[in-house]
Amino acid sequence: MTVAIDGPAGVGKSTVARACAESLGFLYLNSGNLYRAITYAHLKSGRDPEDFEALLRTAETVDLDFADGRIRIDGEDATDGLHTDDVDRWVAQHSAVVEIRRIVNRKLRAITRGRDVIVEGRDITTVVFPDAEVKVYLDASLDVRARRRFDQGTSAMSLDELRDNIAMRDRIDGGKVEGSLKIAADACYIDTSCLTIEGVCERVARLIRNSKNA
């Protein structure tokens, strides 16, 4: 079974998808971490973040692999370096490059073949796995999403800077030529603004269990 979860930045997709995967025995995949890994590798190489031809070469040559929910770049665990402010500044722009999206989508489909998986991202329900058995779109207000990121304490940005950064990413994600953020017609829409993580997880897990028992 494939469970696809989409939604904007800071809505809690990773937390919900990971928790549901652990409770149900599914493989958890964060598609955003593949894009982040490409951006991270590109920045670490010292190349110009605005040189998209060089970015494409990075995406084509870097070896990316998932293991236990973590990402290896050329054999080294790089998961803890994927959520820096520098990566946050560039990942939305890099992930808007059509060729980059196609590389990541091929990788995701290969990893998930023949397995029970929960995959989260921006275009999982619409482009990557349009035939997923369960589709969910998580949402929340911009202010709530910025506050959640701020409270995580992982960024040096102020609350206002985080809000502006998330708003910028929303504009980029919504305007992508391919794989733009949108709500699939057959996705279950959940506004998480006033819900606890536990409440959201229970709703998503119930959808998955009902689908399995159908």
Image (cartoon, rainbow, N blue to C red):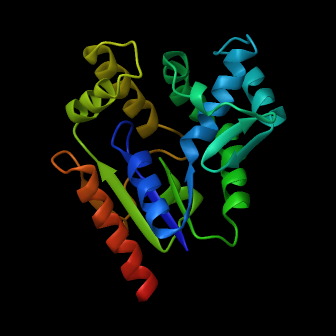
Residue that appears at 53% across and 47% down = 179
51, above or below 23, in the image: above
Residue 129 location (% of width, % of height): 56, 63
Residue that appears at 45% across and 31% down = 172
Task: Please state if 11 lies on the left or on the right of 79 as rendered.
Answer: left
Residue 5 image-quadrant placement: bottom left
Residue 14 location (% of width, % of height): 44, 46
**Residue 58 seen in this snapshot:** yes
Nearest the viewer among 179 and 118 is 118
Residue that appears at 51% across and 30% down = 92
Nearest the viewer among 39 and 30 is 30
Report the residue that reaches farthest toward the bottom.
214
Task: Please state if 73 lies on the left or on the right of 108 as rendered.
Answer: right
The C terminus appears in which quarter of the rendering? bottom left
**Residue 178 seen in this snapshot:** no
133, above or below 101, in the image: below
The image shows a total of numbered marks equal to 0
95, above or below 192, in the image: above
Report the residue that reaches farthest toward the left.
194
The N terminus appears in which quarter of the rendering? bottom right
Residue 164 location (% of width, % of height): 32, 19
Task: Please state if 101 lies on the left or on the right of 30 as rendered.
Answer: right
Residue 56 image-quadrant placement: top right
Residue 154 image-quadrant placement: top left
Residue 169 location (% of width, % of height): 42, 29
27, above or below 7, in the image: below
Residue that appears at 52% across and 20% down = 84
